[in-house]
Amino acid sequence: MSKSRGQWGSKVGFILAASGSAIGLGNIVFFSANAYKFGGGAFYLPYLIALFVIGIPVMILEFGLGHQTRRAFPESMHKAAGKPGEFVGWWALMNACFIVFYYITILGWVLGMLIGAFGQLWQETTPLKGFAMDELANPHGYFFSMLSSWKPMIFVAIVWILNAILVRRGVATIEAAVKVFVPLMWIFMIVLIVRGITLENGFQGVWLLFTPNFEVMKDAAVWQGAFSQIFFTLSLGFGVMTAYASYLPKDSDQTSNALLTSLMNCGFEYIAGLAIFSILFAFAMVPAASTLSMMFFIVPTGISQMPGGDPMVMAFGLLFFLLLLLAGLSSSVSLVEGLASSLIDKFRISRAKAVGLFCIFGFVGSAMFTLPQVVNPGLENDGTLGLTLLDLVDHWAFSYGLLIVGLLECLLIGWAFGAKRLRAGVNSSSRFNLGSWYDWLIKLIIPALILYVLIVGIKGEFAGLYGSDYGPNYKDGFSWMVNSPQFILVGWFVLTVGASLIFTLRGKYSEGSQ
Ligand code: PFF
């Protein structure tokens, strides 16, 4: 079981792995889409405040917990706060499970687009029935016809296999992979931003991203968006950072690790925002708020209009999708590692078995989001059902799951384990000492802020449950999945809470657990 948990080979290896987990699709497209949705400059101030007031302190908490207990998230939380803590730990992982299902489906689609970028993606395609927008740009046609074939099932299987290979041997393989992936991601991103801002009018996009709008900041939805984005982008509330930190040597400095990881992540996010906004503005496109359309239609349409002819279009298309794939893979492996190490810790199964079982299960989960199109490609009906399903699951797991875990972990560590105790452990091996202000952040301020946005969000759901307008668009086949938005909400809640209860109550941790 835990006798050979493994250890990061170097501090650099750990930082690359943690920042590789943090830097992902969230940075490249979700941030820009969210920023646009909330009016560009209206978003980045709440986002920056969320980074310093919530993101960095919670990352110190998650790193500190893993480093002090040297266990994955559920057992760490068990050691810190008993059974209730363990339940929260498993619940975080159950949300992570849903998120990794669709995250890998998206990566499968990215792989399909990467292959298309060799040529097919840019060719004329006949507009697909029922999809008027198709006539506007080629990427729509390519994307939807790919989705209506069996290919995405194969692409999704390939991405799961890649994850299994990277995680099967433990952190040593992950470390070797991120040493290549992360520097490449930075290089690709820098090339993209240089291209973006040197395009005619490209620089105007930068102004939109950076012009603050204080009016919109009164809207609680902006804050909920910023808080969820901070949790997601920093990979917090998933148990992943705790699992990664559990493989650190005893004397490592968690405060500087958390600062470095967070700042690298958010730096990358801003650079990505600049690149995406400049491309969009250069070609006078309206960046749709939907993250998926940003990734699969809008940016590719911008790339297809780049000067320099076919070779340039192809080169930047390949660069963009390869960047998404590398960034996504270094994130998805951390999710798989967080889940596999939790199963290994609790059920004392071998790593190969935990990883193998989870990846097969995960493939079935990911198929949920791409199979409906294959079975019924009629676009008026189930053709976009997988996308809608993905949107609904994302809504609950991303906008609520992460924040609820964040709230509960702060309360349990703050009050049951003791923020002071956690801080003493962190300070004992850190160059920069955290003061008692940190305790109050964890015990009171962060929970109060999260609770506020959650309450406002839930009140909004009562006024009109998210997804209520989807149902009427779907009529047959798999439509029962989204016809009632309550179905997804109750399904997500019952499945995640039920499975967490089962995992908490079954089996026992060995020595040293409470
Ligand atoms: N932080 C990743 C992103 O921004 O795309 C997503 C993610 C990866 C979330 C790993 C959670 C996680 F454990």
Image (cartoon, rainbow, N blue to C red):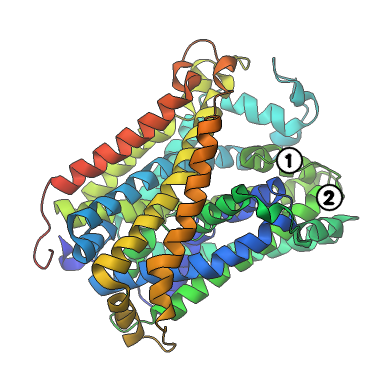
Q: Position of residue 432 (x, y in %)?
A: 44, 87
Q: Are marks 1 and 2 in contact (CB under 8 Å)?
A: no
Q: Which of marks 1 and 2 is nearer the N terminus?
A: 2
Q: In which quarter of the image is the C terminus?
A: bottom left
The front one of 460 and 412 is 460
Mark 2, residues whose alpha carbon is within 10 Å: few (<14), some, or many (≥20)?
many
- The image shows residue 254, relative to residue 401, as above or below, that is below
Report the residue at 59% width, 23% height from top: 469
Report the residue at 63% width, 24% height from top: 145
- Residue position for label 1: 298
Q: Where is residue 269 in the image (x, y as percent from the top left)?
A: 63, 61
- Residue position for label 2: 281
Q: Does the beta carbon of the residue at mark 1 sit less than 8 Å from ligand 1?
A: no
Q: Where is residue 387 in the image (x, y as percent from the top left)?
A: 55, 30
* Three-letter residue code for mark 2: Phe
Does residue 366 appear to the left or right of 265 in the view shown? left
The front one of 322 and 27 is 27
Extreme residue toward the right, this view: 200
Q: Position of residue 380 (x, y in %)?
A: 63, 15
- The image shows residue 442, relative to residue 195, as above or below, that is below
Q: Quadrant of residue 239?
A: bottom left
Judged from the image, the secondary structure of the residue bearing numbered disc 1 is helix
Q: Does the beta carbon of the residue at mark 2 sit less than 8 Å from ligand 1?
A: no
- The image shows residue 475, relative to residue 240, as above or below, that is above
- C-alpha span from label 1 to label 2: 11 Å
Q: Quadrant of residue 270?
A: bottom right
Q: How many marks?
A: 2
Q: Quadrant of residue 27?
A: bottom right
* Three-letter residue code for mark 1: Ile
**Residue 394 seen by the camera:** no
